[in-house]
Image (tube, rainbow, N blue to C red):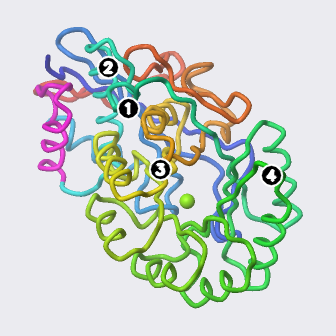
């Protein structure tokens, strides 16, 4: 089987409500998503999506994906979509680095592999059954009262795990937010305080050594080195997110004892092939992981939930579903959805999500062997 055509669409995904990270330092109102359909010479097609969270969250942006696809598409057309490791080597040779550009192609090829094998992705990724996955909320930053009100709203939808965004303000405000939220949770609820790299190491040590709360703290500072410094001086377990892009970054984090867990996001690391490698490493070294995507519709969410579901319980925390923040749903009713705080991946062969071209409109590019339309 060979890849015969790659079709690319762009879609703006508006958020239902504006979203702030890092104490209002970063604001988001819409996401720029890229959808890819890969066709093969045997009539099987697969879908993928790449959607950075805006252009200020990571060194990634929507038009960067589409520019990268111009280089990658001619390189992968003619290759076997089911030989995922080989296909990733082709992409890494054609365009070193730029992992976020590659995830939509990689996910679409996993979708094809699943359909050819007649197996859902959770099984191909190592799962024995479609294990349900806890869903976590994502709480935009604000005053302690505003944030607790958002947590109560999320609790009403069944969420028991929350990710509360802090940082970007003064030390006293962050101490107040953390203590109020940690103390305000109901029985059976848990929270991670996601700093989104807003603290300097000094502020991180000051805040975390002042609070009683011993909840997870995520990406306290900008760099891996700074986070490792903090991890050695505080009692809270540390989770890393934005500073990890390659397998080597994860290896470095482990060597430096910078964290007890990581976020595994296919778009950030280059797709499901590389996310699986990182997940397996995380299991080997005893990390606890949140496995979810950077952003996107229920299509991107579902790819990540297949990986989360196939991860052993002891190493799987909860997963965030980006599509709950969107005011449109390009794949209505399909894929991994929140049902009272729990989501389960589809058991149809492949990804289990496909797009209606009438919803997508006119493609922005069609790549075929020898020419571009
Ligand atoms: Mg995070």
Front in this rendered view, residue 19 or 218: 218
Q: Which residue lies under the disc numbered 3?
A: 52
Residue closest to the eye, 27 or 238: 238
Q: How far separated are the C-alphas under marks 4 and 3?
A: 25 Å
Mark pair 4, 1: CA separation = 39 Å
Q: Is 121 left or right of 165, judged from the image as shown?
A: left
Q: Are marks 2 and 3 in contact (CB under 8 Å)?
A: no
First of labels 1, 3 by sequence position: 3
Answer left or right for 47 relative to 338: left
Given this view, does label 4 or label 3 mark the residue nearer the observer? 4
Residue of label 1? 364
In primary-sequence order, the first of circles 1 and 2 is 2
Is label 1 in contact with label 3 (beta carbons under 8 Å)?
A: no
Most foreground residue, 209 or 54: 209
- Disc sitting over residue 114 in the figure: 2
Judged from this view, the residue extending furthest toward the top is 43
Q: Which residue lies under the disc numbered 4?
A: 151
- Secondary structure, mark 4, is helix
> If you read the primary sequence from the N terminus, does the residue marked by circle 4 or circle 3 appear first?
3
Image point 60% across, 78% down: which residue? Answer: 235
Residue at point 47% right, 77% down? 227
Q: Point out residue 369 in the picture as x, y percentages from the top left corner.
A: 13, 25
Rounded to the nearest angstrom, the CA distance separating label 1 from label 3 is 18 Å
Helix, strand or loop at mark 2: helix
Q: Work out whether mark 4 precedes mark 1 in sequence or the reverse, and give the earlier one.
A: 4
Above-or-below relation of 218 to 7: below
Q: Earlier in the sequence, mark 2 or mark 4?
A: 2
The magenta segment is: 76-95
- Disc 2 and disc 4 in contact, CB within 8 angstroms: no
């Amino acid at each position: 089987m060979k890849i015969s055509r790659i079709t690319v669409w762009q879609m703006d995904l508006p958020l239902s409500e504006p979203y702030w990270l890092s104490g209002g330092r970063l604001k988001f109102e819409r996401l720029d998503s890229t959808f890819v359909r890969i066709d093969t010479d045997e009539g099987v097609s697969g879908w993928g999506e790449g959607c950075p969270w805006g252009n200020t969250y990571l060194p990634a942006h929507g038009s960067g994906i589409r520019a990268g696809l111009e280089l990658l598409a001619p390189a992968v057309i003619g290759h076997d979509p089911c030989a995922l490791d080989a296909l990733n080597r082709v992409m890494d040779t054609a365009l070193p680095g730029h992992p976020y550009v590659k995830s939509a192609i990689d996910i679409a090829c996993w979708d094809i592999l699943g359909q050819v094998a007649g197996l859902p992705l959770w099984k191909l990724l190592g799962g024995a059954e479609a294990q349900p996955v806890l869903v976590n909320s994502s709480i935009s930053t604000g005053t302690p009262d505003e944030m607790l009100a958002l947590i109560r709203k999320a609790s009403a939808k069944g969420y028991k795990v929350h990710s509360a965004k802090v940082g970007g303000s003064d030390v006293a405000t962050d101490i107040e937010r953390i203590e109020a939220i940690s103390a305000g949770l109901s029985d059976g609820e848990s929270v991670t305080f996601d700093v989104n790299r807003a603290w300097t190491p000094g502020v991180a040590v000051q805040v975390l050594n002042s609070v009683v709360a011993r909840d997870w703290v995520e990406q306290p500072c900008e760099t891996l080195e700074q986070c490792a410094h903090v991890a050695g001086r505080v009692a809270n377990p540390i989770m890393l997110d934005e500073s990890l892009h390659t397998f080597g970054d994860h290896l470095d984090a482990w060597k430096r004892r910078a964290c007890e867990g990581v976020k595994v996001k296919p778009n950030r690391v280059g797709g499901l092939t590389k996310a699986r490698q990182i997940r397996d490493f995380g299991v080997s070294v005893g990390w606890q992981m949140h496995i979810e995507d950077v952003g996107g519709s229920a299509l991107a969410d579902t790819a990540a939930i297949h990986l989360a579901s196939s991860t052993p319980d002891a190493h799987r925390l909860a997963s965030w579903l980006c599509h709950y923040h969107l005011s449109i749903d390009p794949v209505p009713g399909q894929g991994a959805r929140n049902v009272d705080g729990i989501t389960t991946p589809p058991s149809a062969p492949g990804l289990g999500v496909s797009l209606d071209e009438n919803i997508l409109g006119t493609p922005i590019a069609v790549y075929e062997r020898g020419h571009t339309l």
